[in-house]
Amino acid sequence: MTTSRPRGLYFEEFVVGQTIHTAGRTVTETDIVSFAGLSGDFNSIHIDAAYAETQFFKQRVAHGLLGLSIASGLAVQTGFMEGTILAFRGMTEWKFSKPIFIGDSIHVLIEVLELKPMPRLGGGLITIKLDVQNQKNESVQSGKWEAIMVSKPKDTEQ
């Protein structure tokens, strides 16, 4: 029986310092309105254009957690964890540095920071840094994620 290899990387295939760049995605008004409905966060700074014009940024701002959610989707779309992630373990030091506006295009730069074998779980812990950037390559959000990745099966060819 032939089995196909998962698209994602096995724990042993990650290297400290390795970088992954995601594709970009433009944040739309529909994204913001949909996220407000999903989350229940109808703060006027996100959904009321007239109100937002009177505030500091002079325009509507995407929810910070919407930016984080889009960043997560962009990271997953690269495929580096597809079929090889055992668990998302946590997120630390997440910072919202600059606003994301309607029409901004964001992408994510991912860097592998640490690797910790966890043989009893059949894999290892990776710590990655994510830097969410806008179309001007300005950092708008950043932080670290931890995930437990499966080890490469012993019976696979190299």
Image: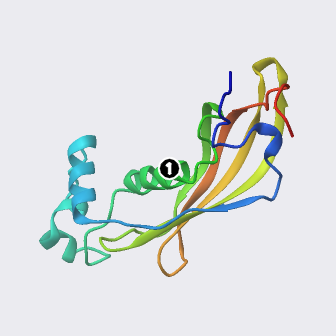
Q: In which quarter of the image is residue 138?
A: bottom right
Question: Who is closer to the viewer here, 23 or 33?
Answer: 23
Identity of the residue drawn at 75% across and 53% down: 112
For label 1, the crowd category at 10 Å Cα-Cα, with few meaning under 14, some 14 to 19 and many 20 or more, is: some
Please name the amino acid that badge 1 sits on.
Answer: Ser
Position of 101 relative to 72 (above/below): below
Q: In which quarter of the image is the C terminus?
A: top right
Residue extending farthest left? 50
Identity of the residue drawn at 75% across and 38% down: 10
Identity of the residue drawn at 38% across and 73% down: 104
Question: Who is closer to the viewer here, 109 or 3?
Answer: 3
Residue extending farthest top? 120
Position of 50 relative to 120 (above/below): below
Q: In which quarter of the image is residue 21?
A: bottom right
Residue 135 horizontal/vertical position (percent): 47, 78
Residue 80 horizontal/vertical position (percent): 64, 48
Left or right of 55 on screen, residue 22: right
Identity of the residue drawn at 77% across and 58% down: 18
Question: Who is closer to the viewer here, 96 or 54?
Answer: 96
Position of 8 relative to 99 (above/below): above
Q: Name the residue under label 1.
A: 72
Left or right of 17 on screen, residue 98: left
Q: What element carries label 1?
A: helix
